[in-house]
Image (spheres, rainbow, N blue to C red):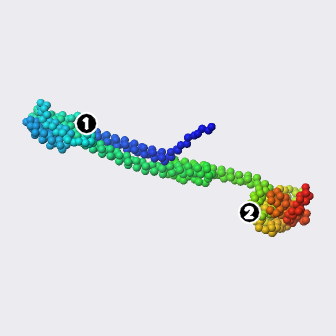
Amino acid sequence: MKRATKRFSRPTLRAVLGRGHLGVALLAAGLAGVLVTLLGVAALRVYANHNLHLIARSINYTVEAAVVFDDSAAANEALALIAATEEVADAKVYDNDGDLLAHWQRDEQGVMAQLQTQVARSLLEEPINMPVQHMGQQVGHIELTGQGGSLVRFLLSGLVGILVCTVLSAVLALYLSRRVFGDIIRPLRHLASVAHAARRERSFDRRVPETQIAELNELGNDFNALLDELEAWHSHLQSENESLAHQASHDSLTGLPNRAFFEGRLSRSMRTAARNEDHLALLFLDSDHFKQINDSLGHAVGDEVLISVASRVRAQLREHDLVARLGGDEFAVLLTPLHSREDAERIAEKIVASMKLPVQLEDGNSITTSLSVGIAYYPDDGRDPASLLNAADAAMYQAKRKRRGHWQVAQPDRRASDVKNRS
């Protein structure tokens, strides 16, 4: 039992780079915002504490006379006048005996007030205790507690700043990721596209375009060089395959198709003709006196005669007709499509007439030969390749018996006797 494998979707390089840019930008913006906020809070804390000491000195000068004369009403009035306009949460004035002489407290309710109180307790100093002196002697002291409103406002503004910077950083990261996509990922996509075309479609003519990044451009150049070699190798292999296929299906002497190629084409043409109810003609050709030429003048001269015969027969045919060498001095011609029997007989007459001119040999001599041609028609003389070839062969032998160098149409009543006489 085959083990099932989990298939998962791999992230794209664009998505990985985009997430990386976004994460780095958000982290940098967050850390920078937090750091700036902490530094600001530290600075503001120093400022707030210093400001509280200044407020305490102002109150000290203001309430000094009231403390000396133990005037609680004047002390409260002076304390409220100053504390109400500053960031003070609670202010107390004591006499030299420690009794409370004046007290002022900010009356605020709500979440913001509670938040200010918590921030003040966390960041500001303990209540400031400052002595009230008169003529160089302490006559009382002041306790002052800060409000923390400035700190809260700064923290909130810092939080808003961090959020704004984070959003801007995210937008900038997306923009940079798109730039990276344009500079890096697009060339890689071109490279992948060309590689897929070469692997799946065997398309070796495509090339990777140039890019601005040196490493990617060098990679593309190396890949293009590899494609050049593959294209050359593929062209050579195709040429070799075509050459081998041609050698397997053609005669090496005349360059004509051989018997196997001709019989395959004949079978396909007969099936097509049967479907379309068409007609075709088969011509069987045999060179007269070829054996005497071979025996008396040699095989080289015989080869020259066969080459000349093939060339002259091919010159008499139409564009879609086929001539093949079946073996020895025997040739076959397939005429398709065939509109009338007169067309086949006219072509056979032209083939016979083309051999009336002497064949010029390489040694300067010439020799005269002829062809005997037998004609068979589909479907009248045969409904399969073998019977049609036999009918054309029998008609060719009839032409030889009557008069060499002529053509003869197959006659059904003589086929059996011709085959018997040949055997």
Give the residue drawn at x 42%, y 46%: 22
Q: Position of residue 2 (x, y in %)?
A: 62, 38
Q: Nearer the viewer, residue 310 or 395?
A: 395
Label ID, residue 121: 1
Q: Position of residue 374 (x, y in %)?
A: 85, 63
| Residue 104 versus residue 330 in the image, above or below | above
Side of 191 relative to 400 (left or right):
left
Q: Secondary structure at mark 1?
A: helix
Residue located beneath label 2 in the image: 276
Give the residue drawn at x 14%, y 40%: 79
- Which circle's residue, 2 or 1, is located before the other in the chain? 1
Amino acid on which the number 1 mark rests in the picture: Arg
User: Which marked residue is nearer to the observer: mark 2 or mark 1?
Assistant: 2
Q: Residues within 10 Å of mark 2 (few under 14, many from 20)?
A: few
Q: Nearer the viewer, residue 166 or 46?
A: 166
Q: Is residue 104 visible?
A: yes
| Residue 44 versus residue 418 in the image, above or below | above
Give the residue drawn at x 89%, y 62%: 414
Q: Position of residue 218 (x, y in %)?
A: 54, 48
Q: Secondary structure at mark 2?
A: helix
Q: Position of residue 60 (x, y in %)?
A: 14, 38
